[in-house]
Amino acid sequence: MVVIQEPLSALLAILLLLYLMKRWWSHQHYPPGPLSLPIIGSIWRIRFGIGLNERTMIKMSKQYGNVFTLWLGDMPIVLLSGFETVKEGLIDHSEELSGRASSPYVKFIGKGKGITFSNGDLWKQQRRFAVGTMRKLGTGRKSMESQIEVDAQKLVEIFAREKGQPFDPALPIINSVSNVTCIMLFGHRFPLEDENFKELIDAIECTFKFGGSPVHILFELFPWILKRLPGPHMKALESIKIMFSLGKKEILKHKKKLSSREPQDFIDHYLLHIEKEQKNDPTSIFDEDNLAHCISDLFIAGTHISALFMQWAILLLTNRPYIQDKIIKEIDDVLGSSSICYEDHKQLPYTNAVFHEIMRYRYVVLIGTGRQTTKDVNIGSFFIPKETVVIPDMYAILHDPQHWETPEEFNPNHFLDKDGNFVTRKEFLVFGAGARLCLGEHMGRMQYFLFLTSLLKAFHLQLPPGVKELSEEIVIGTLLSPKPHKICAVPRESSSKSIQNAIDSELTN
Ligand code: HEM
């Protein structure tokens, strides 16, 4: 027995030594960071995700510098902090950082298809097609603007139905914002009361809440175990399935109608493209599976980020009635009673500054979106090997005391010069930067401006009776939401009559 045990222990000791040497050697290729332990890496430093929040990485960058590595088990994640470093990464090395992070969870839900979670040639082709098709469908043009105006007006009518009584604005906002995307994707809207729509929105919210949670971190560390166990990660996966099944149902409906009509929406255009591509190349990467992923990417990206900014805007403005009054005065002084269009934002510097400040102050993406290096790259004095996950800390940039006068205060002057003119800020990277820049930026900006101005022109947003202030606390997930809350939308004198007319005419129709 003794004879057998000794060589076995020696072998185990050698294997352990080799493993530790290999780990040490591989860690030398990455920027420094907190101590990385076997199996868990440096996740102990963020307490396995417990208490992870939008400031966690800011605190760590003070200790480890603007480029540091956090090890998720054996997976290195390089964090970029500070405007100059993030700019160098995302803009100067746009091509090298154009990959999307493919962590076990991202692979599990995204399957490497569509736009947001794909990479390489597949991503380039799907993104190029989506951008071109959105342009054909009118994004960035007057036709899309009229569409948004219709949905903004519908939202005003929904708020008016509450007759100034307290109500939770979240679902009406999500519904109206997503309907702009739905028209583009499916050619139809979802009514607010639609049960399938509510199920879909709950499912997507559940996926976002899962992001950044301790179970999410465990999934990234031990995917092969978690995939076999029940838990919130399975609910998140179910949500994606709900989204896909909606996409697939729509694809089927569109296939039936397409032969008898001109292409009207994104699905029609994509189906025609599949037909054309597959005639020339049977191995084409345009297929129904990728279409379902594109639908899900555009729906989720086009709905949730925009809707969250709108929710924060309404909450922050309800707490600041004097800012609402200044916006209305500016609109009245500049435009009088004429209706508002997106181009008017150039004539409304204060309004524009407030809307930008809302996005800066309550940026909704936890830290930033993950990228992956497509080649070896040097950022600052650090070498980062190919296929490394890189996360640019956008929250830190938007709250950096070196770039913003009062980063922790809501201050529209961040976007105004001393004469009250609007100033664009290069640090305002709310839509990302570089090769993966948001492809719906123009549509998102239009929606945000037209929806908010329409609401503010129609209502005083007020606190419910007896409430002193709405909580501005953040609920953490992949996206940062406000706590559920109620507001009162009290019709402004001048607008109440026209809203009532609109409601009456809708009822008679
Ligand atoms: C206020 C509105 C919006 C904001 C603030 C916003 C912000 C962002 C951000 C931060 C990213 C990640 C960029 C990166 O990886 O660096 C992104 C990506 C994306 N956005 Fe938006 N977005 C908005 C609206 C929209 C709309 C309306 C659509 C389309 C209907 C859209 C479609 C997408 C897509 C498909 C991506 C993934 C791009 C890729 O990976 O190549 N977004 N967006």
Image (spheres, rainbow, N blue to C red):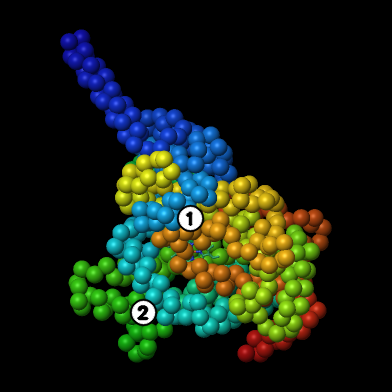
In the foreground, 402 or 459: 402
Q: Amino acid at mark 2?
A: His
Q: Residue at left 68%, top 62%? A: 416
Q: Amino acid at mark 1?
A: Thr
User: Could you say which quadrant of the image residue 58 lies in?
Assistant: top right
Label 1 Cα crowd, 10 Å radius (few <14 / some 14-19 / many 20+) = many
Position in image of residue 479 (x %, y %): 54, 55
Position in image of residue 182 (x %, y %): 48, 74
Q: Earlier in the sequence, mark 1 or mark 2?
A: 1
In the foreground, 10 or 257: 10
Position in image of residue 334 (x %, y %): 73, 78
Q: Residue at left 54%, top 69%? A: 444
User: Could you say which quadrant of the image residue 119 lies in?
Assistant: bottom left
Label 2 Cα crowd, 10 Å radius (few <14 / some 14-19 / many 20+) = many
Residue 207: which disc?
Answer: 1
- Residue 393 in view here: no
Whether residue 194 is situated above or below residue 64 in the rendered picture: below
Mark 2 lies on a secondary structure that is helix
Whether residue 454 is situated above or below residue 379 in the rendered picture: below
Mark 1 lies on a secondary structure that is helix
Residue 431: which disc?
Answer: none
Q: Residue at left 78%, top 64%? A: 321
- Residue 472 in view here: yes
Residue 269: which disc?
Answer: 2
Calculate the distance from the C-alpha at mark 1 to the C-alpha at mark 2: 29 Å
Q: Quadrant of the C terminus?
A: bottom right
Closest to the camera, between mark 1 and mark 2, is 2
Query: Outermost residue, left direction?
Result: 3
Q: Residue at left 30%, top 63%? A: 122
Instruction: From the viewer's perspective, tell me whether residue 83 is left or right of residue 128.
Output: right
